[in-house]
Image (cartoon, rainbow, N blue to C red):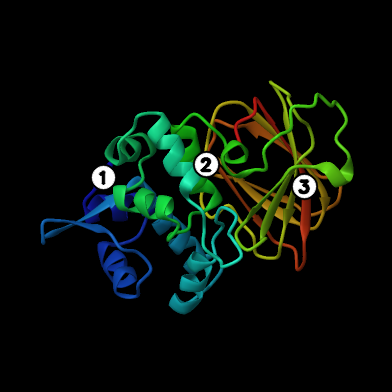
């Protein structure tokens, strides 16, 4: 869906003048209807909510917010730092979807999806999850290392498939192979790592804190601080949820989704 500035501001919980200010500060770039009206997509609204949180909760100024937005998680990069968006383009084309149809499915703008596919734009965990869900796939299927064909119920500690996102701020290691109803993963979060937005999908989730401290937001008004090793949390995946590493150093989580959706 798309929104005019008044409706976008209402959904974010700020004034239209705040959105104009953030645009002047280079924090958001809405599309224009002709040369007149600003048009905001669901993806833009998600980013605006992140900006509001960074301002009100994390007390960051505009340069700090720009750094956070610039450093949000990306698919793995090559040695030159370029983000490879070809798996996204290949998946979309295999589904027979145009950029416009992909935009309608995901709620992300056509220009943003195109930039992702060209490898010139980044996306948060939340945004990538929304896009892969629209394609009926997962982040690991798109960006993880390919499985070999050898059946193996045992996954050795040094043989896990790993997905690195955002300059290694988020590392996700698969703890099982070939499971149909269970997706156990080890999340290793660098300081400041976050989902940078909420996402939702089918199923249920279970989190078990191994070390560090992680805050998890579930639904509209539930906030959970996992700050002692052994803390555990479960919730329906259908509720919008987001998370942030609040430890001074690295945090580690056992994270289980059922069915596999991430």
Whether 46 is drawn above or below 104: the answer is: below
* Residue 2: image tag: 1
Task: Identify which residue, 146 or 128, lies in the foreground.
Answer: 146
- The picture places residue 146, in percent across and down from the top left corner, at 67, 38
Q: Quadrant of the N terminus?
A: top left
Q: Secondary structure at mark 2?
A: helix
Numbered disc in front, either 3 or 2 = 2
Q: Secondary structure at mark 1?
A: strand
* Residue 253: image tag: 3
Residue visible at 54% across and 61% down?
Answer: 72
Please tell me which of labels 3 and 1 falls first in the chain: 1
Q: In this image, 18 relative to 199: left or right?
A: left
Task: Identify which residue, 125 or 8, lies in the foreground.
Answer: 125
Residue under label 2: 129
Contact, mark 3 vs mark 1 (Cβ under 8 Å): no
- The picture places residue 231, in percent across and down from the top left corner, at 81, 45
- The picture places residue 216, in percent across and down from the top left corner, at 64, 48
Task: Identify which residue, 142 or 52, lies in the foreground.
Answer: 142
Please tell me which of labels 1 and 2 falls first in the chain: 1
Q: Is residue 198 among what the camera can see? A: no
Please tell me which of labels 3 and 2 falls first in the chain: 2
Q: How far apart are labels 3 and 1 at the CA level?
A: 36 Å
């Amino acid at each position: 869906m798309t929104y005019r500035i008044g409706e976008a501001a209402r959904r974010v919980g700020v004034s239209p003048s705040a959105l104009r200010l953030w645009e002047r500060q280079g924090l958001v770039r809405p599309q224009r209807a002709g040369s007149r009206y600003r048009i905001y997509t669901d993806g833009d609204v998600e980013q605006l909510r992140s900006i509001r949180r960074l301002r009100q909760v994390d007390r960051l100024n505009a340069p700090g917010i720009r750094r956070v937005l610039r450093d949000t998680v990306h698919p793995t990069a090559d040695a030159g730092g370029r983000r490879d968006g070809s798996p996204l383009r290949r998946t979309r084309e295999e589904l027979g979807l145009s950029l416009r149809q992909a935009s309608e499915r995901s709620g992300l703008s056509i220009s943003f999806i195109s930039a992702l596919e060209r490898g010139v734009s980044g996306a948060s965990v939340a945004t990538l999850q929304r896009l892969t869900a629209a394609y009926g796939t997962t982040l690991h299927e798109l960006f993880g290392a390919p499985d070999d064909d050898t059946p193996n119920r045992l996954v050795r500690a040094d043989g896990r498939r790993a997905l690195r996102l955002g300059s290694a701020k988020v590392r996700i290691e698969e703890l099982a192979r070939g499971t149909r109803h269970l997706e156990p993963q080890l999340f290793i979060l660098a300081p400041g790592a976050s989902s940078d937005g909420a996402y939702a999908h089918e199923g249920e989730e279970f989190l078990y804190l191994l070390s560090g401290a992680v805050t998890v937001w579930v639904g509209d008004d539930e906030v959970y601080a996992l700050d002692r090793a052994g803390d555990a949390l479960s919730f329906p995946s259908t509720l919008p949820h987001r998370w942030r590493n609040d430890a001074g150093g690295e945090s580690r989580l056992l994270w289980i989704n059922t069915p596999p959706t991430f």
